[in-house]
Image (cartoon, rainbow, N blue to C red):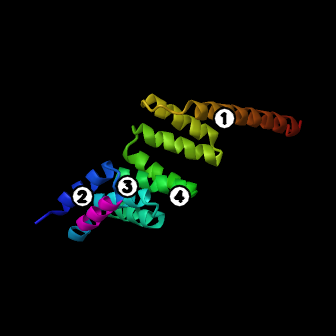
Amino acid sequence: LVSARTHLNRSYAFLLKNLPGEAAQEARRAIGLDPELAQAYNNLGIAYTKQGRVREAEEAFGKAVELDPLYKDALANLAGLLAALGKRREALGHYLKALAIAPTDGVLHNNIAVLYFKEGSFDKARDHARKAMDLGVNVDPGFLDELMDRADATRQHRSRDGERLQQRWRPVE
């Protein structure tokens, strides 16, 4: 008799070989034997993502997170899928949950930096990009240049706005 863990391991092996159909089949077998096995749902989500079955992938990752809310990889995979679908706010929430679990994960910091950048939160993006680099992630130099330019421009704009407000709103003497 083959255990759920054996099917889980097989699904992982098939993912490493870039055989998502076989990986999905093994993950479903693992789930059939142990419906509470969060890792099997995560593997299923990865396989579905590779097959372009995004709705099913989102459901599988969601089920993995439901079963194990502290499963960093499932949170990150769900966030990555949501980001690719343009659901940036939702993706950011999942990335931040994953980061709370693994604050020294440089890849999470990098991905959060990209989402903050796309949201226009350049200072937060810069902070996470720096943290990613401090943790050894090779952050794309073009992204860093654009990020630093935008963060500097935003700071300069805020400074000018502050000066204008100070000139306009003076205390009554």
Could you tell which of marks 1 and 4 lies nearer the N-terminus? 4
Could you tell which of marks 2 and 1 lies nearer the N-terminus? 2
Could you tell which of marks 1 and 3 lies nearer the N-terminus? 3
Q: Name the residue under label 2.
A: 8
Could you tell which of marks 2 and 4 lies nearer the N-terminus? 2
The spot of residue 105 in percent (x, y) is 40, 39
Could you tell which of marks 4 and 3 lies nearer the N-terminus? 3
The spot of residue 162 in percent (x, y) is 78, 36
Can residue 68 be seen in the rendering of this structure?
Answer: no
Distance CA(mark 1)–CA(mark 4)? 23 Å
Image point (65%, 45%), residue name: 120
Can residue 166 be seen in the rendering of this structure?
Answer: yes
Residue type at tag 2: Leu
**Circles 2 and 1 in contact, beta carbons < 8 Å:** no
Q: Indicate whether residue 131 is drawn in magenta.
A: no
Q: Name the residue under label 3.
A: 74
Quarter holding the C terminus? top right
Distance CA(mark 4)–CA(mark 3)? 14 Å
Q: Magenta residues: mostly which secondary structure?
A: helix
Between disc 2 and disc 1, the foreground one is 2
Q: Mark 4 points at which residue?
A: 90
